[in-house]
Image (cartoon, rainbow, N blue to C red):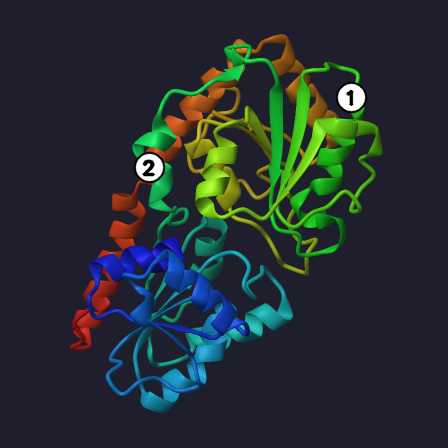
Amino acid sequence: MAEYNALMGLCPGLRVLSAYPEFERCYAEYQARYPQYSERIARFDGTLPDFCGFVYVNFLNNAIQFLPAIEARQVPFLVTLYPGGGFGLDEETSDSKLRRVLDSPLLRGVITTQPVTQSYIEARLPARLRSTLIRGVVVNPLYFATQSLAPRAYFGHGKDTFDVCFVAEKYMPLGANKGYPEFIAAANALYSASPRLRWHVIGNFSASDCDVAALGTRIRFWGRLATAELRDALRGMDAIVSPNQPFKLHAGNFDGFPTGCCVEASLCGVAMIVTDPLGQNPGYVDESDILLIPPDPKAIVARISDLLSHPCRIGAIGQRGQRLSQRLYAPELQVGQRHTLLKTLAAREGCRI
């Protein structure tokens, strides 16, 4: 949504078609939050409007869903291959969809967001096409507002609790691909380490997913949060733990690095304790502006125990990570590159956006 809103702000001729099954419910919520763009959003009915001269689509599954309409009207298109959304590595179903998209004579380019995706696509891209690596995601501008970047408290420096969070959506039992069982195992193991530790779970998880009875009131389940609520919650966190693992949700599945939730946390000054199993780190330095771990509860325990013993490190790591995240995910970089490419390719087709 942040990406679409940003592009609509730059492109007066851009319209968004949604194939989401619960369109009416979500459109009403969107209309209330973003009335300035709501008239440019419509349900996808299987066809493209007559005025459409160029298409931009995110995710492999969306490209497959829109491709029949694109080809029926012979409209050129650009696709971004984010992790997920039907795209996987060395997986037959994903590869079949990918070949279908890459072989379309109407495809004008591919945006990738992770090095592993770029390498995978480069080996499969027809000679007539090029791929563009734009590392990362478009982040809601709220995370770059003055309130988000203002000085904040940390454990031992302005607040008495050490708040550790896990932020993700549960797509499979236990959220195993996101490392939720490892997070809870670490929390239980650290129960006696300090009465100051507090654990926070943000997303569609509940106390019934894993045994948290021993944690009592030291754990809080926030549920899903809107962006402004999430930003405010994250500014009260000291560390975010993301022990996510590839290839668990389904064959070939993997996450970007850092995950979108970790990027948002980092932009709020939260220290990241995360896995990078595919080696996709865009430049964070372990022990300086990030803490890298294997997906192992013992590793999480070790990192948090060390921060408990040296609370001055929490803010230092969080703030250094925040400064780097501000550079890596700056709107002028993330939105700017996408806008320039989209405008250039559309103009070649005689389409002004």
Please name whichever residue, 321 or 99, is drawn nearer the observer in this view of the structure: 321
Q: Which residue is mark 2?
A: 144
Across and down, in percent, residue 283 comes to: 42, 33
Please name whichever residue, 88 or 274, is drawn nearer the observer in this view of the structure: 274
Which disc, if any, is residue 52? none
> Residue at coordinates 45% horizontally, 49% vertically from top-left?
114
Residue 280, can we see it? Answer: no
Q: Quadrant of residue 118?
A: bottom left
Neighbour class for label 1 at 10 Å: few (<14), some, many (≥20)?
some
Across and down, in percent, residue 340 comes to: 22, 57
Please name whichever residue, 327 or 154, is drawn nearer the observer in this view of the structure: 154
Q: Quadrant of the C terminus?
A: bottom left
> Residue at coordinates 40% horizontally, 57% vertically from top-left?
1
Q: Which residue is mark 1?
A: 191
Residue 181, can we see it? Answer: yes
The residue at the far bottom in this view is 72
> Residue at coordinates 41% horizontally, 28% vertically from top-left?
322
* 87 lies left or right of 299: left
When the figure is inspected, residue 252 is found, relative to residue 323, above or below; the finding is below
Q: Quadrant of residue 249?
A: bottom right
